[in-house]
């Protein structure tokens, strides 16, 4: 996630200069050449423009050989398009009297906002030289350029298949991209099931990891960040670390060109809502697919940063609020699915209210009672993170002032009827010899000021985005090692971490 932006940074910009910048943007858009999938993008998803989601969230379908993971894994790409253009015959969930405020608000936005999120592509990465083996499993982007009279184009489906084999890619229809997202999920589920059916799961994989980045993170940057996090994690863990990785990218920013700072600022609330929307919909469904596919055979780990942590918290603690349905069919009465069992959730510098875990937040969220199937929840905060300050953006998890409110000087803290285990900065060492153990049944709140410290280059996020170094890989590995994981007898992955029992609290 890039930096939060303050209003007072723009008080000096003359109105005339803003007008000239706007005209320049229009001129640039008039002279630009079409992209290969430009016809589809134009119909359903803006590529560029002042306040349209950029096409920067499906760039991998253009270059799967180059934009990919440096290790075996999968990328699930979420785009956002005009509701009328992508909804097909889907029936959207309607608010109910029994819904909590956050779910009612989500359903209302889903039915009234002009755009919807959908799964636009699922890509397999092999982590081989030259991108060999990388392939598109599912995509709504199929038709390559209408071209111009008298011109020929070399691109065809074989050129863009990139080694998937005869069965792939499976194409969705742009006009029904929202309901066809279920097809994308089915493709992912079958692919993951194949991985386990063709291999001995006990020796092939050690963990299933779902990872999501935050606000203003184009797909190129998100994939780079996935590579950084997992590379440092593997370095800390050693050769016995063989994860099954699913990275999820989403339309996390508006495109703004020269007016980017102003548009970025105004997009904060919209993208906060979008993070919760994907948590209630397709991200929750991805989490469900991963959990059901692994079926208790390996531990499940979720890693989120900033708004990505927000989306994962909603997905893990609230569950999916959508069902397969089509015109003329009533959505299931049990529309809201309960959250799935999960082993470990790490929220780096989370951009959401910590009170969601307790008495409830001002956004209408109340996770209390819904997160019980998560073995351990780990939240980080840093005194150097100026993006997550309470004075600017409410009681966010990443705010150091909020950490101080909850933790004070004790090992355990309680504030606003929320109990947390507090982990001090001195318990985290640069060498990775961490002296903490996580407690199940409550958030583990970490003062990460010793490791979330530096300005991360080329992110604009300052210390807020300092989570991509070896020390962070050692921290994540210490968290994974703390799991007391035993494959359960049923298809549930609920377990507890190595803990100091709650009864030992002072």
Image: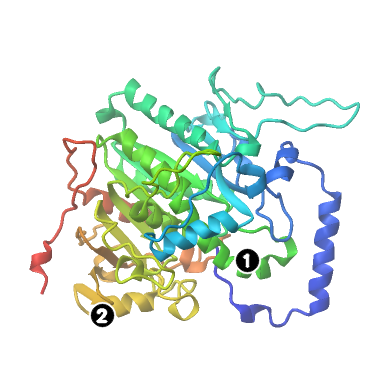
Residue beneath the point at 24% across and 60% down: 434
Residue beneath the point at 82% across and 43% down: 33
From the image, state whether disc 2 or disc 1 is nearer to you.
1
Is residue 31 shown above or below 420? above
Front residue of this view, candidates 370 and 144: 370
Front residue of this view, candidates 363 and 453: 363
**Dot 1: element:** helix
Residue 125 picture location, percent across and down: 49, 33
Is residue 74 shown above or below 431? above
Residue beneath the point at 80% across and 31% down: 146
Is residue 459 shown above or below 482? below
Evaluate whether residue 230 shows in this view.
no
343 relative to 76 in the view: left or right:
left
Among numbered discs 2 and 1, the one appearing first in the sequence: 1
479 relative to 314 in the view: left or right:
left
Determine crowd level at label 2: few under 14, some 14-19, many 20+ residues with C-alpha closer than 10 A: few
Residue that sits furthest to the right in the current view: 150
Residue 448 picture location, percent across and down: 34, 67
Is residue 192 shown above or below 88? above
**Dot 2: element:** loop
Which mark, residue 408? 2
CA gap, disc 2 and disc 1: 34 Å
Colour scheme of the picture: rainbow
Residue that sits furthest to the top in the current view: 166
Front residue of this view, candidates 393 and 303: 393
Please give the residue where the numbered disc 1 appears in the rendered image: 264
Residue 490 picture location, percent across and down: 19, 36
Q: Quadrant of residue 10 in the image?
A: bottom right
């Amino acid at each position: 996630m890039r930096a939060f932006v303050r209003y007072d940074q723009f008080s000096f910009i003359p109105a005339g200069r803003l007008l000239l910048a706007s005209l320049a943007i229009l001129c640039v858009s008039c002279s630009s050449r079409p992209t290969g999938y430009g016809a589809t993008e134009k119909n359903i998803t803006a590529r560029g423009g002042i306040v349209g989601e950029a096409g920067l969230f499906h760039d991998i379908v253009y270059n799967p050989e180059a934009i990919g993971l440096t290790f075996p894994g999968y990328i699930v790409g979420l785009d956002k398009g005009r509701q009328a253009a992508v909804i097909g015959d889907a029936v959207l969930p309607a608010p109910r009297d029994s819904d909590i405020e956050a779910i009612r608000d989500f359903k209302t936005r889903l039915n009234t906002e002009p755009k919807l999120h959908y799964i636009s592509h699922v890509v397999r990465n092999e982590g081989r030289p030259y991108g060999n083996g990388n392939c598109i499993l599912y995509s709504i982007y199929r038709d390559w350029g209408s071209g111009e009279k008298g011109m020929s184009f070399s691109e065809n489906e074989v050129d863009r298949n990139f080694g998937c084999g005869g069965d792939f890619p499976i194409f969705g229809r742009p006009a029904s991209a929202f309901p066809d997202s279920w097809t994308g999920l089915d493709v992912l589920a079958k692919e993951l099931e194949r991985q386990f059916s063709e291999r001995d799961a006990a020796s092939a994989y050690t963990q299933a990891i779902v990872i999501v980045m935050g606000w203003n993170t184009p797909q190129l940057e998100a994939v780079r960040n996935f590579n950084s996090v997992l590379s440092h994690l593997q370095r800390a863990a050693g050769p016995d670390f063989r994860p099954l990785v699913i990275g999820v990218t989403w339309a996390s920013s508006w495109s703004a060109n020269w007016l980017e700072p102003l548009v970025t600022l105004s997009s904060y609330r919209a993208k906060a809502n979008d993070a919760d929307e994907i948590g209630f919909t397709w991200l929750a469904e991805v989490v469900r697919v991963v959990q059901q596919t692994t079926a208790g055979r390996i531990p499940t780990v979720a890693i989120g940063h900033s708004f990505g942590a927000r989306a994962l918290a909603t997905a893990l603690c609230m569950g999916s609020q959508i069902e397969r349905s089509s015109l003329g069919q009533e959505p299931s009465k049990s529309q809201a699915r309960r959250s799935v069992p999960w082993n470990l959730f790490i929220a780096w510098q989370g951009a959401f209210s910590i009170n969601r875990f307790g008495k409830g937040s001002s956004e209408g969220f109340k996770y209390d009672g819904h997160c019980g199937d998560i073995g351990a929840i780990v939240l980080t905060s840093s005194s150097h993170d100026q993006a997550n300050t309470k004075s600017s953006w409410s009681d966010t998890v990443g705010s150091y002032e909020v950490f101080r409110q909850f933790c004070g000087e004790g090992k355990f803290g309680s504030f606003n009827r929320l109990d947390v285990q507090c982990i001090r900065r001195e318990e985290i060492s640069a060498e990775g010899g961490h002296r903490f153990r996580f407690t199940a049944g409550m958030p583990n709140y970490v003062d990460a000021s010793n490791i979330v410290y530096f300005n991360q280059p080329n992110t604009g996020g300052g210390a807020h985005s300092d989570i991509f170094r070896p020390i962070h890989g050692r921290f994540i590995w210490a968290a994974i090692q703390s799991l007391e994981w035993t494959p359960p007898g049923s298809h549930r992955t609920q377990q507890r971490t190595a803990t100091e029992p709650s009864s030992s609290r002072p």
